[in-house]
Amino acid sequence: MKRIIFLFTVLVIPFITLLSQSNKKDSPMIEKSVFGKMKDGKEVYMYTLKNKPGAEAKIITYGATVVSITAPDRNGKYADVTLGYDNLEGYENGTGYLGALVGRYANRIAGAKFTLDGKTYLLSANEGKNQLHGGKTGFSKDLWKAEPIEGKAGPALKLTLVSPDGDQGYPGKVTLQVIYTLTNDNELRIDYKGTTDKTTILNPTHHSYFNLTGVFTNTILNHQVKIDADYYTPIDKESIPTGKIEKVEDTPLDFRKLTTIGSRINDNFEQLKLANGYDFNYVLNNYNGKVREVADVYEPTTGRYLQIFTDQPGLQFYTGNFLSETPVGKNGVAYKFRTGFAMEAEHYPNSPNEPEWPSVVLKPGQTYRQTTIYKFSTK
Ligand code: BGC
């Protein structure tokens, strides 16, 4: 008997342990299912990440899109806090970039062109003559390859996209890897890594819209926002930066103290009128390439609290001023004006045409990196 116990301990237990480790892809923390088929017949998968406290994030391979994230309220009740669609057609036909991974260049490029090393590149224009969020079929419309990984911090999904030379007019073949981790501290952590084979520009972002009430018939006007930025980049009537950098002080764009979104959104301030609400790039304080806390959002009725950390120089704060009721959102709810807000960590809009601003150029041999974290808790 002793001999059997001994053999069991020495041989069988380590074997089982080894087997379970080599089988990490089947871990119960990450589940894979079919989400739908693209118009061209390709299958799109959904991965559900579950962390130890019980939060869930659902991510699809189309556009490396976050379909939902659940977060607890002050009574521990979990609810989905990001806007999205129930099916793939929603994501294929939608124009709001709900939950998407946007690139190559997040935000706007004036005239859909830029010059690099003396050569002018003409990009695909998809907002009048300008480019928005990477062009007609940018990264948010591409099918990504996914690989689940069980990181130390929590379940994670590695998504990879190879964007060919000339994609949407951009030079160079770019390989971008994005790792979404749902940490056991209820953070959605996003780590980006990009390379190119020719000098190019790269400035991706993540484009979730949040509504911390968890009820998408509510607007986000009662949420309170704080953004650590003394300056912003004012826009013209096409939402292209004028090239100036101006103080937020004494304007309704000042969010240096926690302020209710709706309290000044209708103020008679030219920039707010041009953007139809908040849709501005904030020049974040303390930019030095390191991750720091840059913004936070509090929803008083549920107590949900969102903190945003990033190593990026800019943050686009957008209050869903152009949200469309079609396609209809999750659970049959049509998203009205200001049902969600986005906090997009990125470089300033139109930087490729503003040589004084932090550079977005990526050369062969260099590695583009970004880390952005959305942390959910309650207060
Ligand atoms: C932009 C908005 C735009 C929205 C959806 C945001 O990132 O700042 O101007 O309407 O994306 O396309």
Image (cartoon, rainbow, N blue to C red):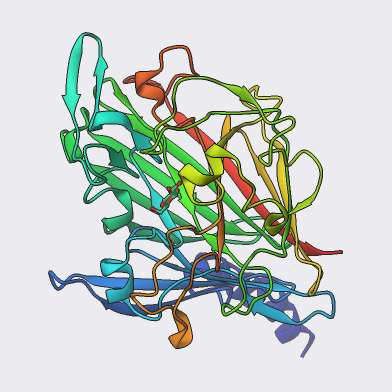
Residue lying farthest to the top in this orientation: 118
Query: Which residue appears at 54% of the width and 38% of the height?
Result: 270
Is residue 292 visible in the rendered image? The answer is yes
On screen, residue 44 versus residue 237, left or right, reads: left
Query: Residue lying farthest right?
Result: 379
At which x and y percent is residue 347?
49, 31
Which residue occupies 33% across, 54% down? 140
Q: Nearer the viewer, residue 167 or 295?
A: 295
| Residue 156 visible (yes or no) | no
Which of the pair 296/255 is nearer the observer?
A: 255
Q: Quadrant of residue 1?
A: bottom right
- Please indicate whether residue 261 sits to the left or right of residue 103 in the image: right
Q: Classify residue 176 by image quadrant.
A: top left
Q: Residue furthest bottom?
A: 1
Q: Position of residue 186 (x, y in %)?
A: 71, 63
Residue 88 spot, x, y in % from top left: 31, 75
Going by the picture, which residue comes out furthest to the left? 40
Between residue 177 and residue 254, name the one nearer to us.
Answer: 254
At horizontal 72% and vertical 65% (from top left) the residue drawn is 222
326 in relation to 105, above or below: below
Vertical side of 270 occupied by 51: above or below? below
Residue 124: image location, x then y, percent: 18, 40
The residue lying toward the viewer, choosing from 277 and 54, is 277
Count of number-bearing discs: 0
Q: Quadrant of the C terminus?
A: bottom right
Identified at 41% across, 13% down, the residue is 355
